[in-house]
Amino acid sequence: MTAELPEYYFRIRENGAAVFRIDTENRQRRIEMNQIAVINIRNGEVKPQGQRALTVADQAEIERWMAERRDLLAQRDIDDIHRAVDYLNLTTQWAQSKATDQQLEDVTDRLLLAMHDLRSVLVRKKADRLNNG
């Protein structure tokens, strides 16, 4: 571990994080993590824990972390979509060159429905963009 610990620790949860303030200024010089809040990244809600009142510094750090986390999640979303395009191409190659009749029978209907659904949404969204632009 590094000698310099951060002042805050964010334990990632499904829709946000639990926020802890790190304390090493005690007799035993142990690391203490005191939970100060729970945050919901989707709706921006910050709930102080117990009877705590968040300081201006706490709130500023939480807002900074939430903005950084939203950016990271947005990057991951688009990266997942780029990967999906790669998987579609790999699936096409597999279906053309390696798949057995039984394997194709197992996946064809589900793939066709998923691709039809995706195509419908993409075409509709593209038409909306063209009409609005």
Image: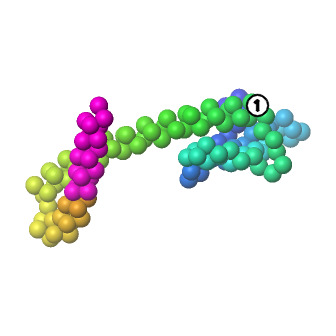
Give me the residue at 84% from left, 35% from top.
25
Which is nearer the eye, 44 or 66?
44
The magenta segment: 115-133
Q: Is residue 44 above or below residue 133?
A: below
Q: How many marks?
A: 1
6 vs 107, left or right, is right
Colour style of the rendered protein structure: rainbow
Q: Position of residue 75 (x, y in %)?
A: 43, 37
Mark 1 crowdedness (10 Å alpha carbons): few <14, some 14-19, many ≥20: few
* Residue 26 x %, y %: 87, 38
| Residue 85 in view (yes/no) | no
Which residue is under mark 1?
56
**Residue furthest right as drawn:** 27
Left or right position of 97 against 89 = left
> Picture coordinates of residue 40 (x, y %)?
61, 48
Dot 1 lies on which element?
Answer: helix
Q: Nearer the viewer, residue 95 or 42?
A: 42
Amino acid under disc 1 = Val
